[in-house]
Image (spheres, rainbow, N blue to C red):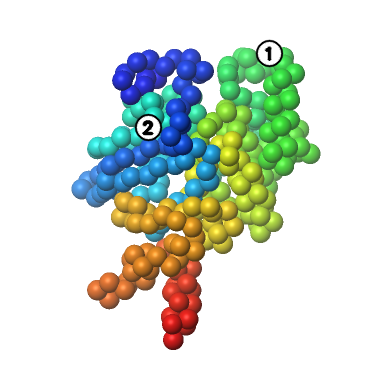
Amino acid sequence: MIVDKSGSPLTARENIKPDTRHGVILYVEDVSVSFDGFKALNDLNLYINDGELRCLIGANGAGKTTLMDVITGRIRPDKGKVNFGQQIDLLQLDESEIAMAGIGRKFQKPTVFEALTVFENIELSLAGDKGIWTSLFHKLSGEKKDRIGEILTTIGLVKEAYYPAGRLSHGQKQWLEIGMLLAAEPRVLLVDEPVAGMTGQETERTAELLTSLAGKHSVVVVEHDMAFVRSIARKVTVLHQGSVLAEGTMSEIQSNPEVIKVYLGEDDGEDSVEYDGVDSSINNSAATQKGDNS
């Protein structure tokens, strides 16, 4: 059952809209998760504003995936609070209830129904009655057809609407899955490595798509491609050893002394942490700074 922070039931979809009067739609406070003694998240605090586009970056094992798992109910934290708006306690909900409340997640590998058309994939994902019987035997209303048309336009697959999804390119399947999430009318989109394996043109189109969604939706992107992050990022959060190390614009992150220290190993002469492209990005920034100071 969907409940608010006081334990009162929130059953109807219209009653589970997050309270964002303070501008924040997602509160993650003092969250810790341990696996066999390893702290995947360590007193992590994160606040996502309503309508913002946020990028999460960090080394492998920094806690990015675990954080997404906690927000979506796949993992229960050892301690901490996770709220959707001010009043919805996500730790009281299961995965399906969290999705119903308005948090959608796209994993790195697209999961679409390849034998169905692009149109049918989106139809199955529409908010409301999603039963197979309904989808097969009930005639779509004009309103729902229009909604599917809007989504097809947004994701750039109007011409491919009646193609089997299996015929789409890798990038197009990623866009279709984003469209399927949009059909469920989420307020928050969690997107994991959306441009992995894409062509340059597909990557550019994905940047445009995610940027266009911000405002109406809050979009949180986990990505290792730093060129892509620079192209879309308004605010970047760096995770390290399960905690937030730094937040700011990409230029602020690249010049942040703590980030440089950790990922270039300047403290105690440690080796640089492998950071899937971020270390080289920071390294270039640090080299520029040294050149400017020489």
Q: Is residue 96 above or below residue 82?
A: above
Identify which residue is drawn at 43% across, 74% down: 286
Is mark 1 in CB contact (under 8 Å) with mark 2?
no
User: Which residue is most to the left?
Assistant: 37
**Which one is nearer the viewer's eye here, 238 or 47?**
47
**Residue 143, how many percent across, how many down?**
71, 20
Tag in front: 1 or 2: 2
**Which one is nearer the viewer's eye here, 160 or 24?**
24
Identify which residue is drawn at 45% across, 62% down: 252
**Residue 247, how many percent across, how many down?**
41, 55
Residue 210 horizontal side relative to residue 152, left or right: left
Q: Is residue 49 above or below residue 129?
A: below
User: Which residue is most to the front?
Assistant: 22
Decide if residue 99 is in sight here.
Answer: no
**Residue 213, how many percent across, how many down?**
61, 41
Tag 1: amino acid: Phe
Neighbours of disc 1 within 10 Å: few (<14), some (14-19), many (20+) = few
Q: Is residue 214 above or below residue 89?
A: below
Label 1, secondary structure: give it.
helix
Label 1 vs 2, first from the N-terminus = 2
Neighbours of disc 2 within 10 Å: few (<14), some (14-19), many (20+) = many
**Residue 42, how many percent across, how many down?**
27, 48
Give the labeled residue for mark 2. 83
Instruction: Tell me the number on the disc at residue 137.
Output: 1
Label 1 – label 2 distance at C-alpha = 38 Å
Identify which residue is drawn at 66% across, 59% down: 200
Residue 135 horizontal side relative to residue 93, left or right: right
